[in-house]
């Protein structure tokens, strides 16, 4: 059965009870193969690359949460994106938003280009400019909203409407928002991908990816690609994700309350020159984001003002941890130009505004007063003595 309220669906959605034993958690079916009762007489499973009950429970859950036709679980977000991109052909082109995840850029720029599937950067936050970029060969667009790391908001419905007029498939990387904050398929997108490593897992203990498609035809194609290329998620990791997803809404409520407070604090601080957060009313993406999402999420980027040293800032943090990744219960900070976005050439980084002074903060669910005091003391220490 499916649940209208996402708070309930997070816990009971998809296949949530083990039919055989009644266990309220789907067991970890740690098996590669399954007994056949005779030639061609399978009990629903034959080999775990093709299908595994723990993975299947997760796949049915994410499909329900995103309101899609079918879900697929992969060994990482990049494996999910790679599988989805494998739906396209040599000669096709994909448009990508200007500040797409570094790994998505890299796989298109350095891997898919070998096979003649090309990309072009397009400003999806400007619908008119985006429509001009749709040439005959464009078959898909991949959007993140808010996009990493400048939190640029794209009007998903507007891009979907334009794309569908031109027969272009709309893929949304919903990692930053999760289905609790934003449901792209309901806004007209065709496919959603996730790095479930982030908020869906939520505890920085698993690397995983998910994809959700909206039609039976796409489901058949992606199931074929998943089984053929084999980047599937293991049963134990599938279990961890199901477990993480149960608490998604309570975690996201705390993450986003904390983020709004942290963003307001940074905005007021004389040591901070810019704050990028679509949950602030004066952010350029505020209104469009509020139309399509519950709130501004929990990712903030900011720049220190002149006279503050970024290295000292990072080295002075005591609670907030300098690390790649995001979306875990602990607050993490990173330096996009040398970490998450280092695979994007410097001239493109400069052009789209990923400066060397940019800091990205994933606001955790610790006490907000502790997060803010840590940021405050690190900013103070980083002021260069005159
Ligand atoms: C981390 C991330 C990815 C890649 O996911 P992995 O699980 O690290 O492979 C893709 N998109 C976004 C927005 C991400 O943050």
Image: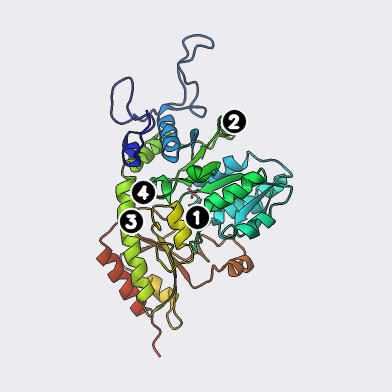
Asked if ligand 1 lies within 8 A of label 2, the reply is no
Q: Please state which of the two labelled residues, at mark 2 or mark 3, is closer to the viewer.
A: 2
Q: Are marks 2 and 3 in contact (CB under 8 Å)?
A: no
Q: Residue at x 36, y 30 (%)?
A: 28
Label 4 environment density (alpha carbons within 10 Å; few <14, some 14–19, many ≥20): many
Label 2 environment density (alpha carbons within 10 Å; few <14, some 14–19, many ≥20): few
Q: Residue at x 37, y 67 (%)?
A: 263
Which of the two residues, 289 or 308, is positioned nearer the viewer here?
Answer: 289
Residue labelled with disc 4: 202
Asked if ligand 1 lies within 8 A of label 1, the reply is no
Residue labelled with disc 2: 217
The CA span between labels 1 and 2 is 26 Å
Q: Is residue 330 visible?
A: no
SS under mark 1: loop
Q: Position of residue 169 (x, y in %)?
A: 61, 43
**Among the two numbered marks 3 and 4 on one chain, the one whose residue lies closer to the N terminus:** 4
Q: Residue at x 58, y 43 (%)?
A: 82
Residue labelled with disc 1: 145
Q: Are marks 1 and 2 in contact (CB under 8 Å)?
A: no
SS under mark 3: helix
Q: Is residue 142 left or right of residue 42?
A: right
- Answer with the quarter of the image where residue 99 lies: bottom right
When the figure is inspected, residue 320 is found, relative to residue 213, above or below; the finding is below
When the figure is inspected, residue 200 is found, relative to residue 40, above or below; the finding is below
């Amino acid at each position: 059965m499916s649940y209208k309220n996402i708070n309930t669906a997070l816990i009971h959605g998809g296949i949530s009870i083990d039919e055989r034993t009644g266990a309220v958690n789907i067991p970890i079916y740690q098996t590669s193969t399954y007994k056949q009762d005779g030639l061609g007489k399978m009990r629903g499973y034959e080999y775990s690359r093709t299908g595994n009950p723990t993975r299947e429970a997760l796949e049915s859950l994410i499909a329900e949460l995103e309101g899609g036709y079918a879900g697929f679980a992969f060994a990482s977000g990049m494996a999910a994106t790679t599988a989805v991109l494998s739906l396209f052909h040599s000669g096709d082109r994909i448009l990508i938003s200007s500040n797409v995840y570094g790994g998505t850029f890299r796989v298109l720029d350095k891997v898919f280009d070998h096979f003649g599937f090309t990309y072009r950067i397009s400003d999806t936050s400007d619908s008119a400019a985006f429509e001009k970029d749709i040439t005959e060969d464009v078959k898909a667009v991949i959007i993140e909203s808010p996009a990493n790391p400048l939190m640029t908001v794209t009007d998903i419905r507007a891009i979907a409407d334009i794309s569908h007029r031109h027969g272009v498939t709309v893929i949304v990387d919903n990692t930053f928002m999760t289905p609790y904050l934003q449901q792209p398929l309901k806004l007209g997108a065709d496919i959603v991908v996730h790095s479930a490593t982030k908020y869906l897992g939520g505890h920085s203990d698993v690397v995983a990816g998910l994809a959700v498609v909206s039609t039976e035809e796409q489901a058949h194609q992606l199931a074929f690609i998943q089984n053929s290329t084999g980047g599937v998620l293991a049963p134990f990791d599938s279990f961890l994700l199901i477990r993480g997803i149960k608490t998604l809404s309570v975690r996201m409520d705390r993450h986003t309350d904390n983020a709004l407070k942290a963003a307001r604090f940074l905005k007021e601080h004389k040591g901070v020159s810019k704050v990028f957060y679509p949950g602030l009313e004066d952010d350029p993406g505020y209104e469009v984001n509020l139309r399509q999402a519950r709130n501004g999420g929990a990712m903030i980027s900011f720049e220190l003002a002149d006279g503050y040293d970024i290295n000292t800032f990072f080295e002075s943090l005591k609670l907030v941890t300098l690390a790649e990744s995001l979306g875990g219960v602990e607050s993490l900070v990173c330096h996009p130009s040398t970490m998450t976005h280092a695979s994007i050439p410097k001239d493109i980084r400069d052009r789209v505004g990923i400066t060397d002074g940019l800091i990205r903060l994933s606001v955790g669910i610790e006490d907000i007063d502790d997060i803010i005091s840590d940021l405050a003391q690190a900013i103070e220490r980083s002021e260069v003595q005159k």
